[in-house]
Amino acid sequence: MLSKNKIKLIQSLNRKKDRDESGLFLVEGNKMVEEALRSEYQIETLVCTSQFADQHPEIRLKAKEIIETDKDSLQKASLLQNPQEALAIIIQPEIETPELNLNAELCLALDFIQDPGNLGTILRIADWFGITTVICSENTVDVFNPKVVQASMGAIFRIKTGYINLESFLSKASKSQIPVYGTFMDGNNIYTESLTRNGIVILGNEGNGISDSISRLVNRRIAIPTFSTNPNKAESLNVAIAASICCSEFRRR
């Protein structure tokens, strides 16, 4: 049975303060819970219908606690408008600065990304293009925000993330002659610019782009050109769409 206290705990994980205090985060939906079951993450509590439990016998080995309930009870606990048959309370792993070999690999760096849907989508994009690490500035939205988790479509379980002082990180990279790319409206055309297979690609804030303190550390400025001739065209691209275009172009070379 799903108790009132358990429902209260589940719903509290919508708030960063409560996630930080409990060390837990929430995953909802059949596919997302299946992704969690396949991952190395530790599942504290799994709440599901009897049908889901019967179809996934591995939950007996993966989850510390299993609560079988009906869809009505799931609806009461869920943060989603249309919950499915399962949700999981998962222990947050320790987030450390990922070890990187920037002489050999490409990573994304996020400068004050605020929208959880954008962060989740960027994780999904990184996963698709085989980019295993996403570095976040300390003021970027929490990766364990339920909307980030949901938008990642399981990529959160595969992509290494780290929250760091981005200026210090990029300063060291730049001094080491690592390519540091930044997306700007006045940068060089990404389709004609020479691109490396390693380095850092910085994506800026949704409204303000890359901050001044970070832009000074960029040694390769790139831009995604518009092909529209309409004088009233869109002023810019959504940051997640820009991330997708950049990743595609870097991998295409």
Image: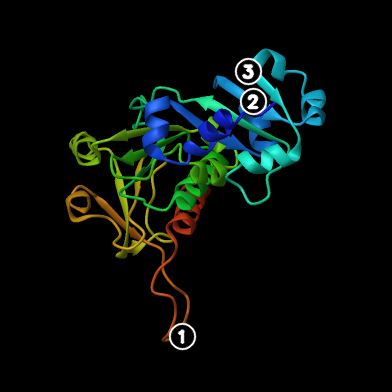
Asked if marks 2 and 1 touch (Cβ < 8 Å), the reply is no
Rendered image: mark on residue 46? 2
Q: Earlier in the sequence, mark 2 or mark 3?
A: 2
Marker count (numbered) = 3
Residue 244 in the image: state x and y as whole percent. Answer: 50, 53
Residue in the picture at 46% in, 85% down: 230
Q: Which residue is mark 3?
A: 65
Is residue 253 positioned above or below 31 on the image? below
The residue nearer to you, when weighing 198 against 49, is 49
Mark 1 lies on residue? 230
* Few, some or many residues within 10 Å of mark 3 (<14, 14–19, 20+): some
For residue 207, side relative to residue 14 (left or right):
left
Image-based side of 79 in relation to 113, left or right? right
Spatial CA distance of label 2 from label 1 is: 52 Å
Residue depicted at 39% across the width and 38% down the height: 16
Q: Which mark is residue 66?
A: none
Q: Are marks 2 and 3 in contact (CB under 8 Å)?
A: yes
Q: Earlier in the sequence, mark 1 or mark 3?
A: 3
Question: Three-letter amino acid code at disc 2?
Answer: Leu
Q: Secondary structure at mark 1?
A: loop
Kind of residue at badge 1: Asn
As helix, strand or loop, the secondary structure at mark 3 comes to strand
Amino acid type at image mark 3: Glu
